[in-house]
Amino acid sequence: MINLTINGQKVQVEDGATILEAAQKADIHIPTLCYLAEVQAIGACRVCLVEIEGNRNLQASCVFPASEGLVVHTNNDRVRKARKFAVEMLISNHPMECLACARNLNCELQSLAEELGIREVRFIGEQSEGRIDDLSPSIRRNQNKCILCRRCVTVCKEIQGVSAIFTQGRGFETRVEPAFDASLNDVACAMCGQCSVVCPVGAITEKENIEEVWEALADPTKIVAIQDAPAVRAALGEEFGFAPGALVTGKMLAAARKLGFDLVFDTNFAADLTIIEEGNELLKRVKEGGVLPLITSCSPGWIKFIEHFYPEMLPHLSTCKSPHQMLGALTKTYYAQKAGIDPKDMVVVSVMPCTAKKFECNRPEMNDSGYKDVDYVLTTRELAKMIKQAGIDFASLENGSYDDPLGEYTGAATIFGATGGVMEAALRTVYEVVTGKTLDNVEFTAVRGLQGIKEATIPVEGIGDVKVAVAHGLGNARKLLESIKAGAQYHFIEIMACPGGCVSGGGQPIPVNNEIRRLRAEALYQEDRDLGLRKSHQNPSITKIYEEFLDTPLGEKSHHLLHTRYTARGVYKD
Amino acid sequence: MDGEHQCLCAQKSEEELYPELDKIIDEHRGKPEDLIMVLHKAQNLFGYLPRKVQEKVALGLNVSLNEVYGVITFYAFFTTVPKGRHSIRVCLGTACYVRGGQGVIEKIKKDLGIKVGGTTEDRRYSLDVVRCIGACGLAPAMLINDDVYARAKPAKLTEIVEKYE
């Protein structure tokens, strides 16, 4: 242990701790900007400067190691002035468009300027000429707002293992972007949006579709359906002051109706359906000697990743569409027929914790209903903005409900939103379908939690030991794929593009850290426990849709509406 | 015309250099930490770093192309533009700067129609800025290949540059 003194207070920390960590342990606040716990500490922005007795220069506390006997001042006049100056310099090259910025009121630079008491813009200098890249259907980059903190570069390279963006050039000319001034749309980008989650300012955001959705809602000739992904209900509340982990399913459904959606469905219904289709796909591959391991396909960031970086492994992917695309296709076929609506008059809006789903809904193969299966994807953040724009008092909403039949779901579906959830849901169903026995303990805790790669072996009568693995975050996905290439044997693998799974997807409320990931996942596990039905094959609406429409899992209609194909893309665009 | 044709044939074409690049990459395969070293060797080979070279280096060393390009654009030594047969380097060190180095640059840019760091389309000239060549007493100074030109005056520049075929 190391003993040091911060602002006259004795602090004891573990070896290897930084001064920032020591201060945090003592509840002493040091402002930070480029630093992001669990992602990056590089001492670049000079906002976390502190004075250390015996050191001539102020030091960046996020990288300065604590050592025995140090005497640190985090809050004297010299330190405050230096921090303020650092932020003033950043502001001197930042467009003052706060009022029209997607991150207005949720911007770290804005908060810092307030915290440090900046009341005038003292330095009027040259502004760097950045450009706006809005060609990607998922991510919008506004180079002008970039403060070069490099968090996005780090998350993309170190955590996602993609490196779609990097710092280009040097000095005042530095930009964060792909090589050769390319658009994100034209490089090997998974569109996972983790860059938008870590961006402290409005330089990287989702590509908003709010206006298109308002237009659809205002059009009297359109029947507009909404569906919400499982992870949305575990995080939407944070945009309205609820603590992380607040489960707001009822309010979310009520808000959807108040916004004017004609049909309120739930992606969870299609999550249950995915389990039936994918579970049968797994059993078929096991029985018939198909390509194993079977790998899940619900995460479109993961799909784009494998298409770019491991196209030779595409046969491992389940052919199941992601749940919201299944639900879109069924809304415009099954439901339209049932309700006597012409599908050309329907608009399907998916609220997703995800930016990659915006890309996915625009894929040319996602038109199996004869129309665009999902018209627009909104992130959780965008839905919150619409609720605010509509003047809805979210916190006081009475619980609403979904519309049948495409809204009913089981606990197995709702845990899709946490890493390991799809695996757990699949195991619950596969076990019972194969053995014909009732699974008493439905909780497969070995596949839960934030460990990067989780493995489990489940004995299933009739198959033997079923070996499964779960990876979240594309860097972990890469490791798992490499181990498969090196000969590791599994039957079934779940991969989610985002660290923590969908609960901390690229479209979720900001900020995110491991504690928030854990709390959001816990909210979903709580909803699972609270639901009477916890296995996908118990969902009565699922039984009914096979009776009335789909006929049989992996049948002809399923093949046409619920399954898809993939595109080998390679790393470079031709 | 004939003479010029022969001259080009004597040089190795870019395509012929790629097997040599592959050999360099093979020595560093899968080692991202060797990136700068490999880029040095590649630039020595090609004279510059065209996109195709960058792509091959990126794949070979297991580094993203975006990162390779980031490193190349960070270091002034690396260039993505082929150099001309004649390298014009104008000094903008302090002494040359105060004695009119900028005017020298502006004149050459105008004459050749290129930017600093650029190469003329016929690859005859490339233009770069250097910071002090140790000829402060002769400011403003410039180099064409290895020839030093002292007290360069914009009015005389066209004539000087024209001498280099």
Image (tube, coloured by chain):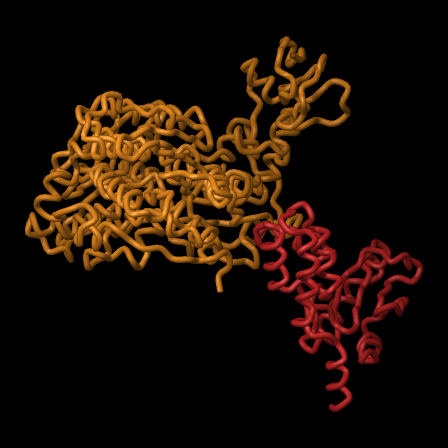
Chain colours: A orange, B red
In the rendered structure, the answer to whether residue A205 lies left or right of residue A218 reads right
Q: Which residue is drawn at 24% across and 57% down?
A: A367
Pick whichever, A282 or A395, lies toward us: A282
Pick whichever, A76 or A386, lies toward us: A386
Q: Residue at x 38, y 43 (%)?
A: A293
Q: In which quarter of the image is residue B159?
A: bottom right
Q: Quadrant of the N terminus of chain A?
A: top right
Q: In which quarter of the image is residue A394?
A: top left
Pick whichever, A296 or A281, lies toward us: A281
Q: Residue at x 57, y 31 (%)?
A: A35
Percent across and percent down for residue A408 are: 16, 35
In the rendered structure, the answer to whether residue A327 lies left or right of residue A29 reads left
In the rendered structure, the answer to whether residue B127 lies left or right of residue A24 reads right
Residue found farthest to the bottom: B2
Percent across and percent down for residue A345 are: 14, 55
Q: Residue at x 41, y 54 (%)?
A: A136
